[in-house]
Image: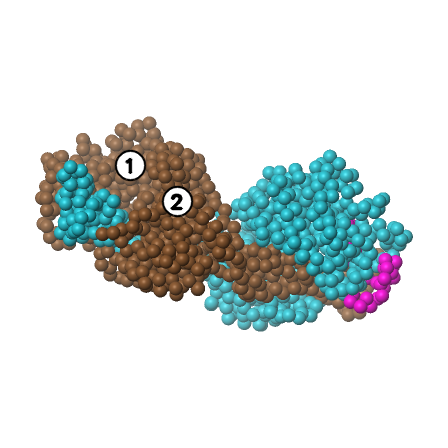
Chain colours: A brown, B cyan
Amino acid sequence: MARKVYIDNIPLEQALEKFMEALQKKSYFVIEEEEIETAHAQGRILSQAVFARISHPHYPAAAMDGIAVKASMTFKASERNPVKLKLNQDYIEVDTGDYVPREFDAVIMIEDVNFTGEYAQIIKPAVPWQHIRSIGEDMTAHDMICPAFTEIGPEEIGSLLTAAVNKIKVVKKPVVAIIPTGTELTSYGSEHMAPGEIIESNSRMLGGLSTSWGASYIQYDIIPDDKNKLREAVINLKDKADILVICSGSSAGKEDYTAELISEMGEIIVHGIAIRPGKPAILGIIDNKPVIGVPGYPVSAHLVFNLFAKPVLYRKQKRSLPEEDHIICKTSRKISSPMGVDDFIHVNIARIKNEYIAYPLNRGAGITTSLVKSDGILHIPRGNEGLNAGDKCHITLKTPRQVIDKSLICIGSHDIALDILRDLLFSRHNIRLISNHAGSMGGIMSLLREETHFSGLHLLDPQNGEYNLSYLKKYLPQKKWLLIHLAKREQGLIVKKGNPLNIQKLSDLTNPDIRFINRQRGSGTRILLDYLLKQQNINPELINGYNREEYTHLAVAAAVKGDTCDVGLGIYASAKIFNLDFIPIAQEDYELCLLPDLLSESQIDLILKVIKDQDFIQKINLLGGYDLKETGHIRYEN
Amino acid sequence: MARKVYIDNIPLEQALEKFMEALQKKSYFVIEEEEIETAHAQGRILSQAVFARISHPHYPAAAMDGIAVKASMTFKASERNPVKLKLNQDYIEVDTGDYVPREFDAVIMIEDVNFTGEYAQIIKPAVPWQHIRSIGEDMTAHDMICPAFTEIGPEEIGSLLTAAVNKIKVVKKPVVAIIPTGTELTSYGSEHMAPGEIIESNSRMLGGLSTSWGASYIQYDIIPDDKNKLREAVINLKDKADILVICSGSSAGKEDYTAELISEMGEIIVHGIAIRPGKPAILGIIDNKPVIGVPGYPVSAHLVFNLFAKPVLYRKQKRSLPEEDHIICKTSRKISSPMGVDDFIHVNIARIKNEYIAYPLNRGAGITTSLVKSDGILHIPRGNEGLNAGDKCHITLKTPRQVIDKSLICIGSHDIALDILRDLLFSRHNIRLISNHAGSMGGIMSLLREETHFSGLHLLDPQNGEYNLSYLKKYLPQKKWLLIHLAKREQGLIVKKGNPLNIQKLSDLTNPDIRFINRQRGSGTRILLDYLLKQQNINPELINGYNREEYTHLAVAAAVKGDTCDVGLGIYASAKIFNLDFIPIAQEDYELCLLPDLLSESQIDLILKVIKDQDFIQKINLLGGYDLKETGHIRYEN
């Protein structure tokens, strides 16, 4: 089993510089132009300066509605001695924009004229050339309207058409050819997938990024892991495209032909870059065209494409890279980072007490939702070991500040009701809710550190069987907080449809043939489980899978459904969603704890309003397993 | 001659509020949705929350290249007692992303395995579920990926396709129907225009704005001033469009049927708004659809469309209006404003000594180039009389800060060479040059007030016949400045081709049948003229047109060409461009005066580099009438 694992580890800037220099040497960045209609040029970049072809106005034009006169005939006009002018002899009527013929040299406003039949009476002399727009007042023929490399917007279109410039030379849109490769890939239309099949979605994401950078893109069919087929694709595309992107196949797995092929057909400039994620990226050149091998993991592909394709595409079009907005944040937790790499971490950002806090998202390179949720990117440069909780850091913003400034964050236990709350807050009130699943104890800790506006909690107190209150009183005795009831919900064992293993009670879990899946430590469900196990004298060590953890109710149900386990503890709604069986174990209180010091009164009112809304209640009722009699009730105010 | 001049003067916010309320009452803002392919949804707005249709991964997947094993078989592995596993029995090979079948529960990295034939040797125990991505690690089926009204970007496309969401419901793109109206209008393809004909370019500008706000647009043919034809157009379009825009025809000129038609077919909400420009705008409703009558002047049309169509279109799509960037500037000169209106003024902005200065652009409502040049809009609210020079003001930015921060400004005399300098600075060095024609004395004043980085000057000292130096020494004795020679150029009388009036010398201008056009006071050319007239004892009062002023050499030539005058004083190049005759009068020095205190060394070097560049020299030589022997020579350093 021979595998090549010899990829480099070149620093980021050096990799980019080498790539750019190599392309420069091949005269890759020479501007290519095409002529297009001005009317359809929005967003395009001029390749040459543009000059007016006619003057505007191209004739002396009335600047007012009124009459055109010969000024010298009015010089003696006064209230006592009005001057009388005859139509079509001494004056003509003109509207704004009308031509003022050569025999006239002034326009008098309609308001200053008294008409009697065909006579106009004037009581004030006109100054020569008054209210006449001179030829070229806006632009003179041959005036430069825009220098080369101006981006054409609606205003430029208007002005250029006015200047009779109906066609313009613009920079050709670079074409990005994207070749997805991998025998495991299946195109996104397919409905039923075997285990091991992966939906190919990277090419559409990279295509979308290309579009937003002014390029167009060609999406090629999926190429299986076959070097010859990949070679054919490259040969097919290399004359049609300005940049080739081979998606996946850039790491050192056994089926990775990309690097081999690039070095056979051209040259590899860099293979292996000291970045995380995205290390196995390839930068190469075939026939004077850049070729980028991006790793298959979407988050890696996204980063590599941003770091390398973006600057190439901008420079190819002679566009300046758009200005980035940066923000200084406090990190919500320790973030470790290997010394040797430039590390890029997607984060959520909320503003709490006028301070911005960055919450790192799941760092897995396969987590597409981290790209969707991301408010910005935290870049930890090489030579740093990471950040401690509370350290200041610079974030490159993706979400506009105005959105962040009015975002709410809820860290704590996950419930599907929070998604419904998130949807309603955003669609009705344009307030974004960041929902971060850290378990109930994680929520308590975030409340304590004032790093969340509110938390979802379901923490059973084994002493009295009561939920949440005793924990809050213990951990947050000095703080102001509001405890709002959201729902009573059923917890139980989620098992396969028809319950083939005949699981009936918790003690059945000690059967070593039954594969259990647990929730993470600190989650309310885990605390509930441990309480019940203790109560029933069941030794957790005897449960097969007690140490295997998932983070949400839906993930537990998905694992049962996908047969990576046989049973898990979770809420009724998630069993129902996946069409699984459910053995009730307990009913619990799921509540929200709000910190009034971190929220405005109107924010608190809004949260209460949405929670009490019939739409909210109805949508949760549809999920099943919820008792909503007390929803919105303020149970305690500290 | 009956004209209706009874339009209102309603305050801006009140007009917008009345319009929005009226539309709201007609249920205009109810969301309309359509289903489209996710892959082509970039830039669209979700009309409903979207939930994952499958989990990702949808199977337990290897997170590393390596081997899949049963963890329990490796528990006893150590360096001393390696565990030997047999291929396809105890282990299988897996690449990243591969399915890990049910019989295995851990993946060991390739680097930690020693292969001998079909045996794999392990020296470290594997932890159950290590290096396996669990089902739904990214997203679980039924997870909410995006709430309603999220804007779809490349990342959302990637994530939704991964979630097997191949189609989504989005907000329908509103359709803007634009109807240009006016008998004087001609469509922009036409090459030869009679005096009085105007190129219709507003509709493309407004269409471009609509596009940038997420709408699409229909461009209708030009309708002459005929109420029935306009009615036909409205009937044709009103079911196809979500908003009707009638361009021009909204003032009180004699051919303005727009208001009449709207009130016949529907209702007028507002006619006449206390804004400048754009007062005669009409806001109406026909059949539950908004109708906006925008004035014909392009700057007015642009403002009215921004103030009224933009908020309607954004709200119709449930988009938030994009965040605007504001900047505090010092005004370069007094700006008067009528008390009763909200006044909007386009300005250029440069940064000088860490202060932003706003330079008002030509305020004419017909000046399309002011929209192209504009860096931002200064809004002077009702109840203010304007600003004094040096007053602070808030500007809504159009040009990004980073572009403004590295812009250079040159206020002073105009020469075509400055356009060439502007083109080269921008296209080669990405530095924008703002060129402001204020005449040579205007340039001196701007240098004195440190409101310009440099100035173009050609000021004759009548005492010694020398150019520029004596003025600078007199007005800027204490300041540091550099005087750089740009060109010697020929000034002379610009007359019609063939010189039909046989003008030979300055004294010919006293012939009352010869129509002269002058340059503005303070311009070098005016100073030259006055010097020569005095020298030759010619009384300016005897010159027909001595008081009629133009601001550039090209404008003077355009006036001669367009026969609004017979002769003007200007440079050879502008006569040549317009194919006119030229009678030489004088050769003068056109020079640049730079203020080193306002420029970095590298900026000065760059200006000198471009000026000395062969490309620059060649382009000016082509214009004719320039002597460039000393171009780039630093004549004096103060």
Gap between marks 1 and 2 measured at Cα: 39 Å
Amino acid at pointer 1: Gly
Is disc 2 on the same chain as disc 1?
Answer: yes
Q: As drawn, which residue projects farthest toward the right?
A: B537
* Residue A525 picture quarter: top left
Amino acid at pointer 2: Ile
* Residue B507 picture quarter: bottom right
The answer to which of A171 and A406 lies nearer the viewer is A171
**Any mark on residue A10, and which?**
2
Q: Is residue B234 above or below residue A564?
A: below
Residue drawn 83% across and 47% down? Answer: B465
Q: Is residue A502 above or below residue A114?
A: above
* Residue B8 picture quarter: bottom right
Residue drawn 44% across and 64% down? Answer: A239
The answer to which of B299 and B514 lies nearer the viewer is B514
Residue density around tag 1, few if under 14, some if 14–19, many if 20 or more, within 10 Å: many
**Any mark on residue A442, and which?**
1
- Disc 1 chain ID: A
Q: Which residues are magenta?
A: B496-524
Q: Position of residue A279 (x, y in %)?
A: 35, 47
